[in-house]
Image (tube, helix red, strand yellow):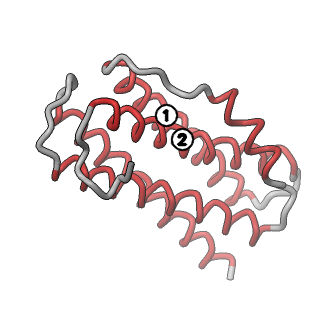
């Protein structure tokens, strides 16, 4: 299954939306871990991480509402957080944390951009309102683009 191809089934749509949920959960878990392990975070970086956490939660809930509408199951945050924690170490310096955040935001942006393109090129009809679905994915993509910009702005300010 590729997000670069038109979406041909409701099952494929559900799986792609679930991937979006997992991406948002990774962003949330990584930012949370960074905030918990370093008490001396730069205030601007701390604020950026807090915004990333809140945004990821909001995005996850929006995606989960669509997944629920198509009667599929989502992936629980509690299932993803330990995997992220086991895989990565968050006790890094500013550059490592900010580059990690940039990577997460860019990955989410690219995924939602590709998903939007796949939705726009599909001929399939789904049991959810296509305009609403495209609108949600467009908003998520634009929010991730703004997140990338916020991270790069902070990087420039710190250099």
Q: Position of residue 36 (x, y in %)?
A: 83, 43
Residue 60 circle label: 1
Q: Is residue 92 above or below residue 61?
A: below
Left or right of residue 41, residue 73 in this image: left
Q: Position of residue 120 (x, y in %)?
A: 17, 50
Q: Is residue 3 above or below residue 150?
A: above
Secondary element at image label 1: helix
Residues at discs 1 and 2 in contact (Cβ within 8 Å): yes
Foreground pick, 145 / 121: 121
Q: Residue at x 63, y 60 (%)?
A: 101
Foreground pick, 55 / 6: 6
Residue 56 circle label: 2
Q: CA distance from mark 1 to mark 2?
A: 6 Å
Question: Residue 72: which quarter of the image?
Answer: top left
Q: Position of residue 68 (x, y in %)?
A: 38, 19
Residue 156 circle label: none
Q: Residue at x 31, y 21 (%)?
A: 70
Q: Residue at x 44, y 54 (%)?
A: 144
**The C terminus - image quarter:** bottom right
Q: In the orientation shown, which residue stands out farthest toward the bottom?
A: 159
Left or right of residue 37, residue 65 in this image: left
Left or right of residue 140, residue 101 in this image: right
Q: Is residue 54 above or below residue 3?
A: above
Q: Crowdedness of circle 1 by 10 Å Cα count: few (<14), some, many (20+)? A: many
Question: Residue 155: which quarter of the image?
Answer: bottom right
Secondary element at image label 2: helix
Foreground pick, 137 / 118: 118
């Amino acid at each position: 299954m590729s997000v670069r191809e038109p979406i041909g089934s409701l099952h494929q749509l559900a799986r792609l939306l679930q991937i979006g949920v997992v991406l948002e959960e990774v962003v949330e878990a990584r930012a949370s871990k960074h905030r918990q392990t370093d008490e001396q975070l730069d205030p601007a970086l701390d604020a950026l991480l807090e915004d990333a956490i809140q945004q990821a939660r909001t995005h996850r809930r929006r995606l989960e509402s669509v997944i629920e509408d198509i009667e599929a199951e989502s992936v629980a945050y509690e299932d993803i957080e330990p995997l992220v924690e086991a895989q990565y170490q968050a006790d890094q310096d500013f550059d490592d944390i900010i580059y990690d955040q940039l990577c997460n935001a860019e990955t989410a942006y690219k995924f939602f951009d590709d998903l939007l393109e796949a939705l726009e090129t599909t001929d399939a009809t789904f049991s959810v309102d296509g305009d609403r679905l495209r609108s949600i994915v467009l908003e998520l993509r634009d929010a991730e683009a703004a997140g990338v910009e916020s991270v790069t702005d902070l990087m420039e300010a710190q250099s």
